[in-house]
Image (cartoon, rainbow, N blue to C red):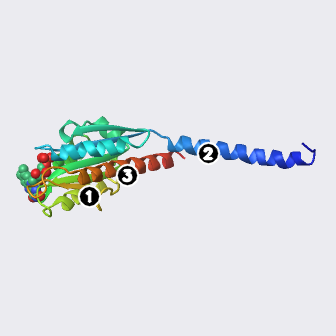
């Protein structure tokens, strides 16, 4: 190695070291573990099946822990430790099931997370199942997202335009593979966005 080449090579080496250090820092920020709460009501199993698929999608994102619970079993701690909440409901007379509405009302009365906006900047999303092709699934999703917006959450779509949904009545019984894939896509997107939000918050 000639003496004249040394400073140049040393310079290149320094740049490489700096790039490696920056890369490691960014990777550390991006590798933040996140917790996603997937919660739902289900009377006959369709929304529960979607919840399981949403869970699988979120778990496919490295570093993601998923808590899967019925809305009636959620605790205050489940809400507080979550980085994202994905809520699913069957359509009951064009809107969310009473159990899911009660769950959101509990955010004020039972869990007490609404008054100080303790869910603020957590990521939120929704999914729904309904018997008919067009009889309230999107409205159900949007009303769930509305409750999240009032709590100053960051709502996202995924799977479908507003969230994931499945038609379960006689013309299209149960949750088919396309609808299951939509649910997995929703879970994956929420986990990805929650990781981005969390890593951004730590910088
Ligand atoms: C009380 C009640 C009201 C319902 N209202 C609607 C409705 O307005 N629109 C619709 O598409 N399906 C409606 N359904 C059908 C359910 O939304 C559908 O079967 C759903 O997939 C049930 O989800 P689950 O299996 O998770 O309970 C209703 C079902 C019940 C029990």
- Residue at horizontal 27 percent and vertical 38 percent from the top: 68
Q: Looking at the image, is 180 positioned above or below residue 133?
A: above
Q: Is residue 106 visible?
A: no
12 to the left or right of 124: right
Q: CA distance from mark 2 to mark 3?
A: 24 Å
Q: Residue at x 82, y 46 (%)?
A: 9
Q: Mark 2 — residue?
A: 23
Relative image position of residue 145 (x, y in whole percent): 27, 56
Relative to 178, say whether 80 is above or below. above
Measure the alpha-carbon separation of dots 1 and 3: 19 Å
Q: Earlier along the polypeptide chain: callout 1 or callout 2? A: 2
Q: Are marks 1 and 2 in contact (CB under 8 Å)?
A: no
Depicted 95 relative to depicted 191: above or below: below
Pointer 2 or 3: first along the chain: 2
Location of mark 1 (residue): 146
Horizontal and vertical percent for residue 153? 34, 53
Q: Secondary structure at mark 1?
A: helix
Compute the Cα span from label 1 to label 2.
38 Å
Residue with the mark numbered 3: 189
In the image, 82 versus 61, the foreground residue is 61
Foreground tag (1 vs 3): 3
Query: Residue at the location (70% across, 45% down)?
Result: 18
- For the point 30% across and 37% down, the residue is 67
Is 51 placed left or right of 123 in the picture? Answer: left
């Amino acid at each position: 190695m000639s003496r004249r080449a040394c400073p140049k090579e040393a310079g290149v080496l320094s740049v490489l070291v700096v790039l490696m250090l920056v890369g490691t820092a960014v990777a550390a920020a991006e590798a933040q573990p996140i917790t996603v709460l997937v919660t739902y009501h289900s009377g006959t199993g369709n929304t529960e099946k979607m919840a399981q698929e949403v869970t699988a999608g979120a778990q496919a994102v490295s570093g993601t822990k998923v808590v899967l619970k019925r809305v009636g079993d959620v605790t205050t701690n489940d809400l507080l430790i979550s980085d994202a909440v994905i809520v699913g409901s069957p359509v009951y007379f064009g809107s969310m099931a009473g159990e899911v509405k009660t769950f959101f009302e509990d955010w004020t009365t039972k869990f007490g997370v609404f008054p100080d906006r303790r869910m603020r900047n957590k990521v939120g999303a929704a999914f729904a199942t309904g018997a008919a092709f067009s009889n309230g699934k999107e409205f159900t999703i949007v009303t769930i997202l509305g409750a999240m917006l009032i709590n100053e959450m960051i709502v996202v779509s995924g799977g479908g335009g507003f969230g994931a949904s499945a038609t379960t009545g006689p013309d299209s019984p149960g949750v088919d593979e396309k609808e299951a894939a939509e649910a997995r896509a929703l879970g994956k997107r929420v986990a990805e966005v929650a990781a981005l939000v969390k890593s951004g918050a730590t910088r």
